[in-house]
Amino acid sequence: MQTISAEEAGFDANKLDSLALFLEEAGSSSMMIFVDGKIAFEWGATDQKHTIHSIRKSMLNSLYGIKVAEGIIDTNHTLSELGIDDVFPLTEKEKEARVADLLRSRSGVYHPAAAVSDGMLRGMPGRGSHRPNEHYYYNNWDFNVLGAILEQQTGKSIYELYNEEIAQPLGMQDFNGEFETIYLTDEDVEIGFPQTDGFYQYEEKKSNYPAYHFRMSARDMALYGQLYLQNGNWNGKQIIPESWIEESTKPHSLYNPRFGIAYGMLWYVLAPTETRTSKSFYHTGTGVHMLGIYPASNLVLVHRVDTEEDYEFGEAEFYGMINRVWGARR
């Protein structure tokens, strides 16, 4: 990957130096900024792999786009048609949810799921309170089941698919598809992180479907963001259909009208507002990791914190990081 000077990329070099100092003091592990497909800023251990948490959903987006285009997955198929049920049986109404509803996190299925945070549980509606596609709720059950459907329809693991369809074509340096499986019980307080590219997290008392975690480096994640910035095209080959990326990054569920924040299909969307003329999209993990794609600025941003170890980086530091990145623009 080529580099570009701060000035050529539209940044103030002194302010990028201040950003690097801030990242060091705040406890970040790495950051990369691409502008015009070139490295404009690189800081920290950008080759270090650790868990990307909720950004795993955006990694799944590309695989769905590819397999839908190939006719292997039909987003209009319902859970009933796909034979999906769970530990606490789904109702006939819940089974009417389509793959398209799960992609938008609008299934109306509020079943216990693996890897659910306390914050997600606090906002979870009751079973049967909404019909499919009636209500948006950021729902790990939807996301986990999407992983299972992908594997069911392709006969391959998520990690094998990602390595074949994305990592190898993009020339990722730190991902080769190795994975493990862990099983958690109610007594388990902490996760032991396998040192692989990914791992399935089963919580069998809650659900039949595991969470599929990814462990990736900042430099590999930045390549993935660049693929989306280039509308799915890489070195002249259309890896992800452009129409899929366009549909995925529409504001399907505008849940914060004041700031124009919405959820698309496995991506968050910053919709145009009175003060923001262009659309961008991103995903975060545990509120500290970020993969952001900003088409109007031709920019990709990756921020990482090693959350597999003790860390203090929090919400204030996260917004401080964002403000310093954009404050460094000239």
Image (cartoon, rainbow, N blue to C red):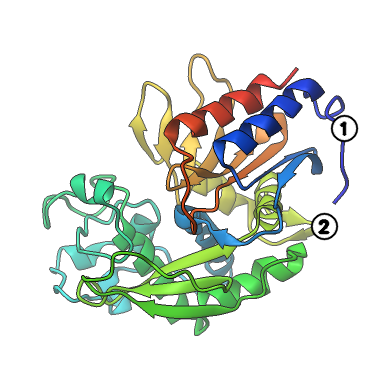
Residue 164 is left or right of residue 184, and the answer is right
Residue 140 as seen in the image, left or right of residue 129: right
Is residue 312 or residue 155 the one in the foreground? 312
The Cα–Cα distance between marks 2 and 1, rounded to whole angstroms, is: 26 Å
Q: Is residue 71 left or right of residue 140?
A: right
Which label was assigned to residue 216? none
Q: Residue at x 46, y 56 (%)?
A: 53
Q: Earlier in the sequence, mark 2 or mark 1?
A: 1
Where residue 271 appears, as percent x and y from the top left, is: 49, 30
Amino acid type of the residue that numbered disc 2 sits on in the rendered structure: Gly
**Residue 296 visible in the current orientation:** no
Tell me if residue 259 comes above or below residue 266 in the rendering. above
- 41 w.r.t. 324: above or below: below
Q: Which residue is mark 1?
A: 5
Location of residue 247 with respect to 178 vertically, above or below: above
| Residue at the image position 36 percent from the left and 25 percent from the top | 257
Q: Can residue 253 be seen by looking at this rendering?
A: yes
Q: Nearer the viewer, mark 2 or mark 1?
A: 1
Question: Residue at left 21%, top 75%?
Answer: 86
In the image, what residue type sits under mark 1? Ser
